[in-house]
Amino acid sequence: MDNDLRVLRAIKNITQEELADALDVSRQTIIAIENGKYDPSLKLAFKISNFFGKSIEEIFKE
C-alpha cells in the first residue's frame, strides 16, 4: 500500500525513531510501512492519522 508517511515525517522534521517512539512501535515498523512492505493495523493507522492530523485516506492509498 502506498503512503505519504515519509513526506509527512519530513514536513514535521522528525526522525523514524522519534515517530516510532510517539506511536509506541519499533523503528523497523516505521521503515517497513514507509517502504510499503507492511500495512499497519487499523489501530496503528488511526494512531498515525491522529499524530499527523490527517485522515487515514489522506495518508494511505491503494
Image (cartoon, grey):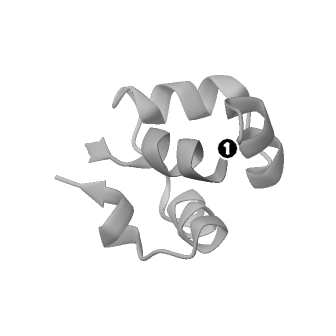
Residue 51, by quadrant, is: bottom right
Left or right: 1 as drawn, with respect to 34: left
Left or right: 58 as drawn, with respect to 23: left
- Residue at the image position 80 percent from the left and 48 percent from the top: 24
**Amino acid type shown at disc 1:** Asn
**Residue 52 versus residue 12 in the image, above or below:** below
**Residue 21 versus residue 23 in the image, above or below:** above
Left or right: 20 as drawn, with respect to 36: right
- Residue at the image position 71 percent from the left and 41 percent from the top: 14
Mark 1 secondary-structure assignment: loop
Q: What percent of the width, then of the height, locates residue 15? A: 71, 33
Q: What percent of the width, then of the height, locates residue 45? A: 51, 61
Q: Say which of 52 and 36 sits in front.
A: 52
Q: Say which of 51 and 42 sits in front.
A: 51
Q: Which residue is mark 1?
A: 13
Q: What percent of the width, then of the height, locates residue 16? A: 67, 32
Which quarter of the rendered picture does the N terminus lie within? top left
Left or right: 58 as drawn, with respect to 22: left
Q: Say which of 6 and 25 sits in front.
A: 6
